[in-house]
Image (cartoon, rainbow, N blue to C red):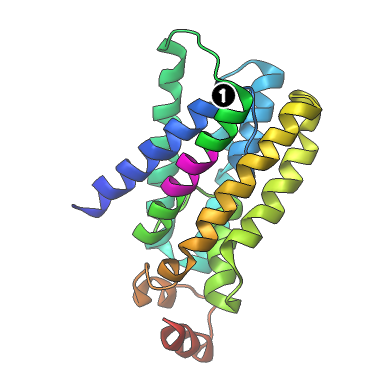
Amino acid sequence: MSKLLKILFGSFVVALGVIILQHSDLLTGGTAGLSLGLMYIFNMPFSLFFFIINIPFYIFSFITMGWRFTVSTILAVSFLSLMTSIDIFLPHFVIPSLLGATLGGVVIGLGVSYLFITGASLGGAHILALFLQKKFNFNPGKVSFSFDFSVILISLFTVGIINGMYSILSIVILSSILSYFKGNFATASPNKTMKESKTYSPTAKVSFVANS
């Protein structure tokens, strides 16, 4: 399977998870969570907010992770934005909060993990999580959870306390899945991707290759 098809598949899996959360009136973390919160407030498409919010993170990704990873991330974000936009054509349905939180967390966690292994991300805190893992060997699940939890707290008033708690359950599941697969992320991207970054010193490159 070509890398483009892998990114397309990973984005499709995450899109399913996002749609599940949308129909459960739940939030998730990162830029996707901010986008869901803004969607609830302004009643505008998730895909529009998600694409716009990620633009500054593309710059950070290019500087720290190289252009190959950045292009892959832009493709993943674009695919996800397009796929989630089909929700407006789906019939209205409601998913119970507990089921939505559990299923949504699992599906998004698997989709994001697959994208990480492929050498892509969904922007935002995911870029930072991968960067910190490669640079300092931080646990990407814990980094992701810290940012996701903050986003949900900020957006809590849009869904209420009860659904906010279910949203936290969802990111706990998502972060646990990322932590489970973290051993695959460090070796997912080719070494040359990291060498493209202008911020890495020769010592940092050697350290990354050794850790891989």
Q: Nearer the viewer, residue 150 or 103?
A: 103
The stretch of residues the image draws in magenta is: 105-111
Q: Residue 92 location, x and y as percent?
A: 50, 8
Q: Looking at the image, which residue sits at the far left? A: 1
Q: Is residue 107 magenta?
A: yes
Q: Give the residue at mark 1.
A: 22
Query: Residue 118 is drawn in which quadrant?
Result: bottom left
Residue 128 screen position, x and y as percent: 59, 61
Q: Amino acid at mark 1?
A: Gln
Does residue 196 appear anywhere in the picture?
yes
> Horizontally, is 193 left or right of 164 in the view?
left
Using the image, determine if residue 137 lies above or below residue 92. below
Please tell me which residue lies in front, 144 or 189: 144
Q: Secondary structure at mark 1?
A: helix
The residue depicted at 63 percent of the width and 25 percent of the height is: 97
| In-image side of 4 versus 22 (left or right) | left
